[in-house]
Image (cartoon, rainbow, N blue to C red):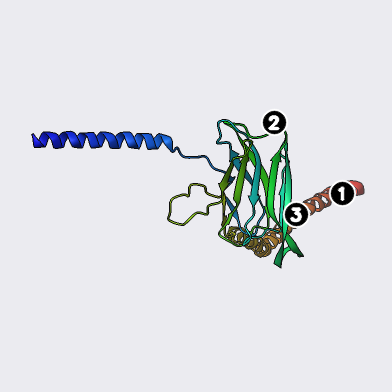
């Protein structure tokens, strides 16, 4: 009797656990957050990225996007691509020491980009929108974290501002992250074989010159031989004509 009661209690606990797991699983689905696309770029170069903004609301549209550029990784040149139905405002801040871009000293850097939708141009439920940006030279850091605020037409704001922690799970509201890789040395390495090939071509010049000289001498010998045959033929013809003239 005791074993039966324990079995029933265990089965009931298991059933409750399964139901709770199912309920919690459906109650807290994984959210689609704001991301940067592509997610990787190269230090020192220029990159074109786009902030991809999905709309998570079932009833409201996304009408504003505020992207803050990291203070520890200023960028000298930032330009935006027009997005139909949206306007963009650019905020700047002073940087010290100045940034050097193409030999010029720049004392200001873009600190924030704010896109605002015109009437009925917001990102509607079930849709997403990309906001392209060109920026560079990209700083010598491992990553750039863009803390972002997404405002809905009903006044709600999604704050994508949590920084990732290495080795930990993704936070609930992660900020978009652009990973920066060190500049590859493949370009300089590939340039070396080209230079070596050029040197090899120059080194083979002596051999080519010798081959050309030999070819020239061969042609000259052939011409000289032909000339000898012609002269010999003329001499033979004259020798046959002289006795006939005397006779």
Direction from residue 96 to residue 173 in the image, left or right:
left
Quadrant position of the N terminus in the picture: top left
Q: Report the mark closest to the observer, 3 or 2.
A: 2
Q: Position of residue 57 (x, y in %)?
A: 56, 34
Q: Secondary structure at mark 3?
A: helix
Q: Report the mark closest to the observer, 2 or 1.
A: 2
Direction from residue 243 to residue 113 in the image, left or right:
left
Direction from residue 123 to residue 221 in the image, left or right:
right
Q: Secondary structure at mark 1?
A: helix
Q: Nearer the viewer, residue 9 or 78?
A: 9
Callout 2: 10 Å neighbours few (<14), some, many (20+)? Answer: few
Q: Position of residue 31 (x, y in %)?
A: 50, 40
Residue at horizontal 74 percent and vertical 61 percent from the top: 108
Q: Position of residue 109 (x, y in %)?
A: 71, 59
* Count of numbered tags: 3
Q: Position of residue 44 (x, y in %)?
A: 64, 59
Disc 1 marks which residue? 243
**N-terminal-most mark, 3 or 2:** 2
Q: Secondary structure at mark 2?
A: loop
Q: CA distance from mark 2 to mark 1?
A: 117 Å
**N-terminal-most mark, 2 or 1:** 2
- Residue 225 disc label: 3
**Residue farthest along the bottom direction in this orientation:** 97
Q: CA distance from mark 3 to mark 1?
A: 29 Å
Disc 2 marks which residue? 120
């Amino acid at each position: 009797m005791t074993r039966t009661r324990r079995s029933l209690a265990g089965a009931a606990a298991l059933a409750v656990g399964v139901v709770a797991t199912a309920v919690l699983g459906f109650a807290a689905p994984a959210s689609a957050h704001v991301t940067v696309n592509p997610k990787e770029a190269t230090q020192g170069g220029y990159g074109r990225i786009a902030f991809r903004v999905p709309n998570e609301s079932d009833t409201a549209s996304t009408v504003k996007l505020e992207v803050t550029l990291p203070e520890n990784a200023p960028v000298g040149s930032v330009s935006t691509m027009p997005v139909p139905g949206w306007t963009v405002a650019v905020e700047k801040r002073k940087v010290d020491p100045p940034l050097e871009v193409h030999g010029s000293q720049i004392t200001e850097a873009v600190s924030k980009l704010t896109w605002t939708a015109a009437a009925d141009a917001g990102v509607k439920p079930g849709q997403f929108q990309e906001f392209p940006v060109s920026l560079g030279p990209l700083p010598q850091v491992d990553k750039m974290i863009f803390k972002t605020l997404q405002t809905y037409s009903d006044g709600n704001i999604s704050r994508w501002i949590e920084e990732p922690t290495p080795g930990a799970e993704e936070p609930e509201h992660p900020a978009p992250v652009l990973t920066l890789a060190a500049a590859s040395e493949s370009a300089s390495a590939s340039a070396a074989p080209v230079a070596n090939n050029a040197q090899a071509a120059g080194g083979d010049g002596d051999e080519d010159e010798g081959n050309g000289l030999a070819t020239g001498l061969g042609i000259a010998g052939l011409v000289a031989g032909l000339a000898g045959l012609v002269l010999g033929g003329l001499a033979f013809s004259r020798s046959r004509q002289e006795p006939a003239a005397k006779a």
